[in-house]
């Protein structure tokens, strides 16, 4: 929806209120303010009539294996921690944003609008509206692009977006039968009615309903689908283990080198201060080879070691129109440019989002694969990443399933997820999107690149990609 | 167990199987050039290559969409196996088909039909047994990798292998359908299956012939391991799934050689208990007895194959393999020579023929279909249409009628969900193609309208005019009428070339037949389109000429009238039913009238009586009319000849019928009233009318006549249809009987000219 908003803005830039804004802030909307300082010769993606929207700051709590230090919290606690971290880092006045949007996947029933609960708890002004979005693993991407849409439409100038996921505790429900009995019990008037309802409870009423990371439409768990996807593209176990090891190794190095500057320290109530991700564990190929397949037994290839693990964590970003950021005295990190959402068959192409979204967003931005300096792809499973890379490298797949003349082409590995990824850093479903975007901004700065690309897959057979442009130094 | 109580069961079982065989392997034929090049010897059906130390044996019949066990295939397979056993570089083998939709669909029927004596067929069976025995005793483990249909001889081959891996695809089905062709699994099946899946399951498989999905097969112990089908990757899903299956099978073959994968699974507690119980002879005898009883009850002893299957299993279990294999091959030979088997095989061929569109492909595919009337029929047609991805409008005139109809469609699909043949998500997504409405909104986009409104020419004319006022010029108007001539309906049309009859049978989702009726004015494209829609709905189709009652209703009407006469002459409905079912009809005549509806029967009898005069006389239609007046409209009203109460299995005769019959009592003539006479009175009127339809050109040929009678009216499948029945029974014998009845009852039993011609010259046959 947000991309549609952007589109319409592009097509008819002249409306009266817009004209005023454009007139008063012409500099900011037509070209980057400091374009002349651009170090690289590549063109900027700014377009006439389209607002420049910038990432001011991005933070996240340490991503922890679920069931560890965060175990006794609630989802909004994590989101709150991320929001407070953002406030601390940016010194943002607590009433300076117009809106707050959060993404989450597994909802705690008590805090179904987790954005609002977290914002109140983090000390934001209670006058700031907040809503929660959900789009599986690209929920916080959706939060960010919703923010972009609000700013582009002139509704807001500054929005906080973020995401949270808390897998240490998930809602486990009574069975439908039991729920029905309990609800009926509420309405029962006489003792006799109540007793007869209680008497109707059988053993089968007591078996609980557990949430599973499974598609509703196909009832297939994601790991199973990933294993089939890897098999469909002929991805070997060895390739997957190698990629997983690469992810852990790079993440460890990034952590040791202090590159993960988006991570905030968090004093966990009742526990210690945490300041580091705790899932990064570079192992050896031999160790990894020992593991048995986790989903397709005994001949599958997806194991616990080459999959992302259940993670607790939250992230937050501050997004503003460029002129607002500059007016408030911020030095933005990056421009958020074109983005797309795609979706495809949730059974056999569940995790192929990046393959479909990457060429589409590049086309929108008028870029080619070689223009991109920094790639950050969400690593759900090593097999999923390898399958996407093979799909992007296949003329047959491009022609048969994507309606293209030739293959998409693959990102060069020396620009790809260089600071680790979801496999090693962890993957709190709702929070990963903001981590990807912030990492791209940081890497662009560190590596001196101009364009970055974020791509991710999500349950439901959906996908997302966004182009990010470095803010001139 | 053959314990299903549905009256149409034998017909269903039979037809279901054919459908699967026919469609399973339809789309996937590809040539495997590089692999055949590897083959040094000039073999055409079987090839192999050695990967590491595993020989991958591939079957691919180059002349057919499916693999069958033919003489050629058998010879080449024996050759290849001998080479593998002699080759020291080979430690194990994987047996796989090169056709993604089919492992082996069964033995080549033509190979059996080419034999002229039981001994010849017995020899074929023994050769098959010998080959599979060698496979079973192979010193090098053989892994059968199954994707697609694995039926009959194919399954017997697979269960002779040491290990079986199957894909969890919907196309993968295992089964022993021989019984539906009047045969038995003649290549060791009756001996190996009981050992593999236990007596009860083995009997169930062999006596019903039903297809077993892969997941069920795994539970039963018929296959060891399942592999998920893959989606698109670097190759098409079908091709990649085959490659993956092969890769996994190779892994397992190596694992078996390395003793990492056990061939025998540890038996569970239940299995151990069952084995223990089965070790008692009297328990086994009880099972044989129960199964025998059930078969006799269901088949009335008219089908020899199920009894022979029980005999073979029993011989093998009780007297050992030597006696068992001998019994199997000998019985197989005998069965192949029976009239029942050739009747059933004839139906198989007929059904394959009636699943083709002899009118070519229509100019415009029907993408949106509208059905008028959400009654049993209308909703039934909607149900078999929506799940084929066709957008379906279901229109009724009242909210209640529409709600009932939509609920029927939902229930039909939801039952499939409960049986796990579709997921709840698939159900919902199928239902999104259905649009229930009370008006003609959106009819301008409709490609075909099928009306299923009340059987009254005035109402039919009214809806035809309403429809023509709103639809686009290309839209076809089809009438689902069971008796009104289509040309009378078309008389109200501005474009009679677009009017056609599509006569469905109730319940639409279960009954396979669709009778399509064309008038002189119906265009060829209209016919082609109607057939295409019917085929999409999964129907077996006969296309007949126009006339009162077309073909099926016209054959049925005289039987119904005769049945009323039999009742008036003093037989009780139960007696009538037992006479008809013991002749091989799946449903008794009285029950059938209740199912059809007494009111419908009145309509049909009166309409056709008017059209054909005294030839359609017999019983007094007033009997039925009186019943309708009293509200006895058959099953739908709770009372007809019988009383129907929800939840009660045994139905009782409606006690109030006695009085009505008493009022219309007729005196039975003892010369034509023995049980056998009554049976032949019923059957001869049916058969004579069918032959007359052929004589008058209503029928295109005897084959469609047989298919229509068996699949639409339940004509005894063991007799193969009225025309095959005449060929095997002898037209002269039937004519003799008819003349005897004619002397008593008059022209209702006058044989038609074509029948007389066949009676005169015994060399004349309807089927070659």
Image (spheres, coloured by chain):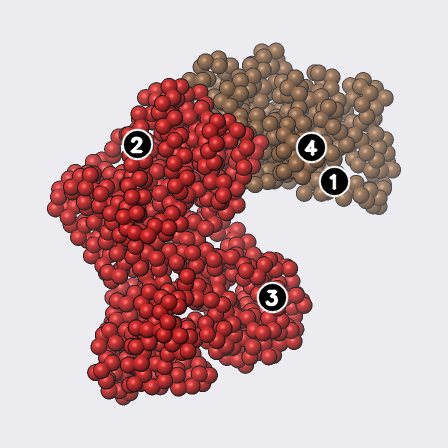
Chain colours: A brown, B red
Q: Mark 2 and mark 3: span between their CA atoms?
A: 55 Å
Give residue A446's quadrant in the image: top right
Which numbered disc flags the more N-terminal residue, 2 or 3? 2
Judge if badges 2 and 1 mark residues of a common chain: no
Mark 4–mark 2 contact, CB under 8 Å? no
Task: Tell me the crowding category of disc 2: few under 14, some 14 to 19, or many 20 or more residues within 10 angstroms, Cα based.
Answer: some
Dot 1 falls on a residue whose secondary structure is helix
Dot 2 falls on a residue whose secondary structure is helix
Residue beneath the point at 52% across and 54% down? B388
Which mark is drawn over residue B134?
2
Could you tell me residue B525's position as x and y percent?
61, 64
Judge if badges 2 and 3 mark residues of a common chain: yes
- Closer to viewer: mark 1 or mark 3: 3
Q: Residue furthest top?
A: A257
Give residue A36's quadrant in the image: top right
Chain of residue at mark 2 = B
Chain of residue at mark 4 = A
Mark 2–mark 1 contact, CB under 8 Å? no
Q: Mark 4 and mark 2: span between their CA atoms?
A: 51 Å
Which mark is drawn over residue A406?
4
């Amino acid at each position: 929806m947000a991309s549609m908003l952007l589109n319409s803005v592009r097509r008819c830039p002249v409306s009266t209120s817009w004209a005023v804004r454009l007139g008063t802030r012409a500099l900011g909307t037509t070209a980057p303010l400091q374009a002349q300082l651009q170090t690289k010769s590549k063109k900027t993606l700014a377009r006439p009539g389209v607002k420049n929207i910038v990432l001011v700051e991005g933070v996240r709590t340490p991503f922890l294996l679920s069931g560890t230090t965060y175990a006794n919290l609630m989802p909004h606690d994590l989101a709150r921690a991320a929001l407070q971290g953002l406030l601390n880092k940016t010194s943002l006045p607590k009433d300076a944003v117009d809106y707050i949007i959060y993404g989450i996947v597994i909802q705690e029933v008590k805090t179904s609008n987790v954005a609002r609960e977290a914002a109140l708890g983090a000390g934001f002004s209670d006058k700031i509206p907040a809503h929660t979005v959900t789009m599986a693993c690209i929920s916080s991407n959706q939060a960010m692009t919703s923010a972009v849409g609000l700013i582009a439409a002139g509704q807001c100038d500054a929005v906080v977006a973020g995401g949270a996921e808390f897998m240490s505790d998930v809602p486990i429900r009574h069975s439908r039968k039991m729920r029905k009995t309990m609800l009926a019990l509420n309405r029962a008037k006489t003792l006799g009615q109540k007793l007869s309802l209680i008497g109707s409870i059988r053993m089968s009423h007591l078996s609980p309903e557990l949430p599973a990371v499974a598609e509703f439409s196909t009832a297939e768990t994601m790991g199973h689908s990933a294993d089939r996807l890897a098999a469909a593209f002929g991805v070997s176990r060895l390739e997957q283990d190698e990629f997983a090891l690469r992810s852990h190794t790079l993440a460890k190095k990034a952590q040791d080198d202090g590159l993960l500057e988006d991570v905030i320290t968090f004093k966990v109530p009742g526990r210690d201060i945490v300041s580091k991700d705790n899932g990064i564990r570079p192992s050896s190929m031999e160790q990894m080879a020992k593991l048995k397949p986790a989903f397709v037994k005994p001949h599958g290839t997806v194991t616990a070691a080459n999959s992302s693990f259940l993670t607790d964590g939250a992230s937050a970003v501050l997004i503003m129109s460029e002129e607002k950021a500059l007016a408030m005295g911020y030095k933005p990190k990056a421009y958020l440019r074109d983005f797309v959402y795609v979706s495809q068959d949730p059974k056999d192409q569940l995790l192929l989002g990046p393959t479909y979204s990457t060429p589409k967003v590049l086309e929108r931005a008028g870029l080619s694969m070689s223009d991109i300096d920094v790639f950050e792809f969400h690593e759900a499973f090593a097999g999923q990443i390898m399958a996407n890379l093979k799909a992007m490298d296949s003329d047959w797949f491009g022609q048969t399933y994507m309606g293209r003349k030739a293959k998409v082409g693959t990102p060069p590995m020396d620009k790809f997820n260089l600071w680790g990824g979801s496999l090693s850093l962890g993957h709190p479903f709702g929070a990963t999107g903001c981590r990807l975007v912030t990492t791209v901004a940081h890497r662009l700065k560190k590596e001196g690149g101009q364009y970055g690309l974020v791509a991710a897959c999500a349950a439901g057979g959906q996908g997302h990609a966004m182009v990010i442009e470095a803010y001139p130094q | 167990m053959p314990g299903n109580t549905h009256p149409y069961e034998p017909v269903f079982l039979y037809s279901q199987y054919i459908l699967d065989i026919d469609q399973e392997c339809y789309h996937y034929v590809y040539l495997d050039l590089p692999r055949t090049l590897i083959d040094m010897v000039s073999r055409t059906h079987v090839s192999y290559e050695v990967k590491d130390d595993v020989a991958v044996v591939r079957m691919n019949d180059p002349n057919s969409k499916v693999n069958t066990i033919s003489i050629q295939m058998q010879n080449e397979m024996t050759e290849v196996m001998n080479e593998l056993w002699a080759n020291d570089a080979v430690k194990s083998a994987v047996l796989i088909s090169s056709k993604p939709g089919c492992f082996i669909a069964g033995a080549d029927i033509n190979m059996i039909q080419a034999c002229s004596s039981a001994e010849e067929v017995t020899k074929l069976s023994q050769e098959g047994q010998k080959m599979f025995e060698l496979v079973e005793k192979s010193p090098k483990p053989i892994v059968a990798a199954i994707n697609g249909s694995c039926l009959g001889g194919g399954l017997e081959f697979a269960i002779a292998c040491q290990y079986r891996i199957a894909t969890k695809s919907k196309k993968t089905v295992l089964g022993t359908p021989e019984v539906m062709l009047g045969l038995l699994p003649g290549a060791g099946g009756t001996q190996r299956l009981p050992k593999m899946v236990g007596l009860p399951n083995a009997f169930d498989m062999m006596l019903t012939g039903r297809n077993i999905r892969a997941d069920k097969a795994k539970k039963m112990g018929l296959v060891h391991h399942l592999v998920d089908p893959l989606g698109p990757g670097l190759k098409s899903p079908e091709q990649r799934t085959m490659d993956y299956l092969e890769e996994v099978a190779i892994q397992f073959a190596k694992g078996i050689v390395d003793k990492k994968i056990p061939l025998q699974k540890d038996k569970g507690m239940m299995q151990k208990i069952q084995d223990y119980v089965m070790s008692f002879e009297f328990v086994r005898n009880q099972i044989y007895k129960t199964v025998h009883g059930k078969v006799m009850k269901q088949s009335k002893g008219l089908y020899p194959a199920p009894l022979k299957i029980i005999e073979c299993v029993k011989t093998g279990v009780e007297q050992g393999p030597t006696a068992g294999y001998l019994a199997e091959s000998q019985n197989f030979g005998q069965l192949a020579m029976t009239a029942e088997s050739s009747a059933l095989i004839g139906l198989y061929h007929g059904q394959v023929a009636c699943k083709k569109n002899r009118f070519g492909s229509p100019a415009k595919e029907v993408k949106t279909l509208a059905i008028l009337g959400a009654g049993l029929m209308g909703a039934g047609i909607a149900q078999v249409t929506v799940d084929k991805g066709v957008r379906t409008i279901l229109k009724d005139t009242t909210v209640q009628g529409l709600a009932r109809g939509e609920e029927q469609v939902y229930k039909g699909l939801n039952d499939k969900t409960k049986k796990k043949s579709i997921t709840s998500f698939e159900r919902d997504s199928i239902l999104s193609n259905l649009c229930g409405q009370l008006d003609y909104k959106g009819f301008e986009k409709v490609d075909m309208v099928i009306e299923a409104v009340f059987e009254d020419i005035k109402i039919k004319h009214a809806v035809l005019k309403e429809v023509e006022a709103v639809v686009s010029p290309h839209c076809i108007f089809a009438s689902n009428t069971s008796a009104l001539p289509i040309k009378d309906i078309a008389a109200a049309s501005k474009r009679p070339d677009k009017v056609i009859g599509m006569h469905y049978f109730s319940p639409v989702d279960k009954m396979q037949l669709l009778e399509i009726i064309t008038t002189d004015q119906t265009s060829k494209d209209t016919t082609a389109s109607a057939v295409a829609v019917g085929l999409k709905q999964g129907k077996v189709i006969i296309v007949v000429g126009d006339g009162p009652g077309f073909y099926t209703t016209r054959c049925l009407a005289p039987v119904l009238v005769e049945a009323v006469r039999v009742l008036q002459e003093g037989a009780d409905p139960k007696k009538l039913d037992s006479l008809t079912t013991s002749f091989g009809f799946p449903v008794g005549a009285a029950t059938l009238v209740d199912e059809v509806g007494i009111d419908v029967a009145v309509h049909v009898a009166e309409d056709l009586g008017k059209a054909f005069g005294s030839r359609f006389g017999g019983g007094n239609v007033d009997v039925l009319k009186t019943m309708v007046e009293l509200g006895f409209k058959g099953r739908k009203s709770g009372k007809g000849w019988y009383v129907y109460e929800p939840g009660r299995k045994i139905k009782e005769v409606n006690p109030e019928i006695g009085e009505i019959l008493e009022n219309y009592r007729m005196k039975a003539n003892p010369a034509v009233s023995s049980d056998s006479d009554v049976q032949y009175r019923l059957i001869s009127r049916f058969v004579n009318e069918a032959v007359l339809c052929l004589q008058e050109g209503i029928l295109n040929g005897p084959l469609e006549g047989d298919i229509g009678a068996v699949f639409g009216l339940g004509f005894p499948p063991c007799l193969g249809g009225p025309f095959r029945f005449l060929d095997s029974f002898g037209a002269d014998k039937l004519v003799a009987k008819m003349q005897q009845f004619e002397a008593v009852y008059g022209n209702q039993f006058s044989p038609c000219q074509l029948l007389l011609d066949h009676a005169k010259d015994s060399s004349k046959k309807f089927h070659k």
